[in-house]
Image (spheres, helix red, strand yellow):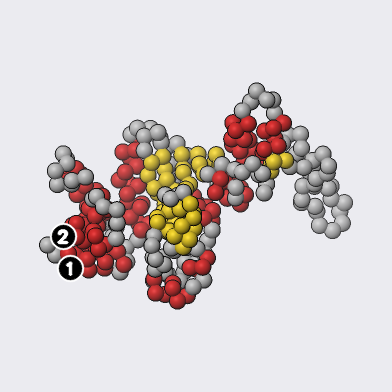
Amino acid sequence: MDIQTSDGSESRFSAFVEGLVSVIGHADRARPLFDYCIGLIMPGERKSVEPMAAVTAPDRTAAQHQSLLHFVGQSAWSDEGVLAKVGEMVLPAIERHGPIEAWIIDDTGFPKKGAHSVGVARQYCGQLGKQDNCQVAVSLSLANHHASLPAMYRLYLPQEWAADKKRRRKAGVPKEISFKTKPEIALEQIEAACRAGLPRGVVLMDAGYGCNTDLRTSISALGLTYVAGILPNTTVWTSNTAPLPPKKWSGKGRPAKLLRRDHKHQPISVKELALCLPKAVEVGAVIIVAAAVLGAKTLL
């Protein structure tokens, strides 16, 4: 994209960045923010500040490198504040094409070489489709049939990083950041979106998140509907095998709270449930329906 020649794009881009200037904390950061955003959308595989400096200021690359490095690594602006401002500016344009229909929980992997970038570790990378050296970020996006917009975004910090005080100190990881699983991060993002009053939609998530019982239960407790990918061995209660109520309190000791099971009242796997249904129904479709309809009652 050539921002200098694309019809109308320069003025729209400038107006967008000017909107972000109000939440980055200091007027001196306006120019570095503008240059950094240009660097992000210009051609080039590497989006670190060194190649960005060469693209955005080829006649003063060294000085530009230092300016961008300070803006990214030292300036105390809030990523949450920037994302909120982006939502304020962009959501109305998306909603002109229809209401928000979905909250999409997912994660994105960024292939990396070396071990110094915050959170980098050997883990699954979606871009590569395999385990490799990468960073991973968990996101919550708001979407309709026209477009989607990341509303929450947080870097996942693997346990080995969270426990390494020396590496944390060298990379500048704040002390208050502790290890959290990806589903725990996702739940925090969903809760924050609810508090912010963002337009609600059905929560969509793949099996990496859908198999987490606590996450599904917590989403239901927030009054949200979800559709989750699950694994074939996920167990569910059916109408014929529902657990028995707790034993009636005799007046002695503590009242029983746990649901009861016997040989007729046991959860079954969704795969078993699917195979028990008429052969005319596709097994894959049945598993999806079982996940959607019975998801709030699934047990691991």
Q: What residue is shown at x 46% (from left), y 39% (from top)?
A: 102
89 to the left or right of 179: left
Q: Pointers 2 and 1 in contact (CB under 8 A)?
A: yes
10 Å neighbourhood of mark 1: few (<14), some, or many (≥20)?
Answer: few
The three-letter amino acid code for the residue at tag 1 is: Ala
Task: Tell me the residue that label 1 is attached to.
Answer: 63
Quadrant position of residue 110: bottom left
State the SS at label 1. Answer: helix
Task: Tell me the residue that label 2 is attached to.
Answer: 57
Indicate which disc, 2 or 1, sits on the residue closer to the N terminus.
2
Q: Nearer the viewer, residue 184 or 235?
A: 235
Q: What residue is shown at x 43% (from left), y 63% (from top)?
A: 120
Task: Report the disc number at residue 220.
Answer: none
Q: Residue furthest bottom?
A: 166
Q: What residue is shown at x 52% (from left), y 55% (from top)?
A: 182
State the SS at label 2. Answer: loop
Q: Residue furthest left?
A: 59
- The vertical placement of 268 against 27, above or below, is above
- The vertical placement of 43 against 144, above or below, is below
Residue 196 visible to the viewer: no
The three-letter amino acid code for the residue at tag 2 is: Ala
